[in-house]
Image (cartoon, helix red, strand yellow):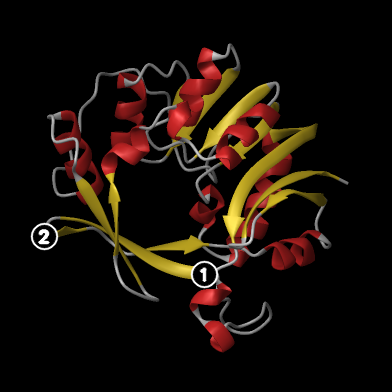
Amino acid sequence: MSMTSHMNLENKSDPVEMAIEEYYSGYLDTELIVNNNYGKPESYPVKYFFRNEYDMPDIEKYTLSLCRGRILDIGSGTGPHSLLLQRSGMDVTAIDNSQAMASVLLKNGIKKIICDDIFNFQCQNYDTAMLLMNGIGIVGTISMFQTFLKKMELVLHLDGQILFDSTDISYVYGSRAKKLGNKDYFGEVKFQFQYKLNKGAWFNWLYIDRNTLLDICKTTNWKVQIIFENNNGQYLSRLVRK
């Protein structure tokens, strides 16, 4: 559904919404805790989700330069990437399944906003689907990644592209990292947001390494271009139809 109302963070028990509300109230050093099922919790300053172009890593700025046509910013969050594209005169739609995020997007001046799950999304004829900040993680699992690729065949033009970055996190497990085909894949993890003493529900997140991505796409209608890669396992990929 489209977002046309003013900002209204209704679910006060949600840690992300609480942290954002505190940030908007003037507490600019507010931090969100992210618990996981593989190691120690990590903290993220909320202001990172409101960063401008100068605070973005090169991989994100380069991805934005590759966008063309009608753009769908999937899992847009607070919309820093949509905002930059919009300011550049690009036709961009931000989609996020969180009502609170949709409210923030509206407050930040994003013109085209959809509050929905990408798997329920019915619109078509986009030229670029973009998922940044390890955004492909929203699919949660390898099997849902394959479902996502099929969904994109319906959403994008025949010559459309999918742009996303991800990371090989096998280093977290060392020799315990399992390969695709076993019961578990090391890139399937679980996260939980926490703000102060308030904890949200656990949710699935996917980090897909480049080799697994290449293997999967061999059996799909998509071919992979690895555009950028660094020594930390992070890479940027572009998927186009075969």
Residue depicted at x 27% and y 42%: 46
Q: Where is residue 133 in the image (x, y as percent from the top left)?
A: 50, 46
**Residue projecting furthest to the bottom:** 175
User: Splitting the image into 4 quarters, where does residue 217 fall?
Assistant: bottom right
Q: Which of marks 1 and 2 is nearer the N terminus?
A: 1
Q: What element carries label 2?
A: loop
Q: Position of residue 131 (x, y in %)?
A: 56, 42
Residue 225: horizontal and vertical position, in percent?
A: 79, 49
Relative to 55, is 181 above or below?
Answer: below
Query: Which residue is located at x 80 percent, y 57 percent?
Result: 220
Q: Quadrant of the N terminus?
A: top left
Residue drawn 58% across the image and 33% down it: 61
Identify the amino acid type marked 2.
Answer: Leu
Three-letter amino acid code at the position of disc 1: Glu
Rendered residue at 57%/82% (across/down)? 177
Q: Is residue 144 left or right of residue 68?
A: left
Q: How far apart are marks 1 and 2 (CA)?
A: 26 Å
Q: Position of residue 106 (x, y in %)?
A: 34, 21
In this view of the protein, which residue sits in the foreground, 125 or 108? Answer: 108
Dividing the picture into quadrants, the one containing residue 197 is: bottom left
Q: Is residue 164 above or below residue 193?
A: above
Label 1: how many Cα within 10 Å (few below 14, some 14–19, many 20+): some
Q: What element carries label 1?
A: strand
Q: From the image, tell me which residue sits under label 1.
A: 188
User: In the visual, does 122 lie left or right of 98?
Assistant: right
Q: Residue 197 carries which label?
A: 2
Q: In this view, does 154 lie above or below 103?
A: below
Name the disc covering residue 170, or none: none
Q: Judge by depth and name the residue closer to the eye, 44 or 178.
A: 44
Specify the farthest residue to the top. Answer: 89
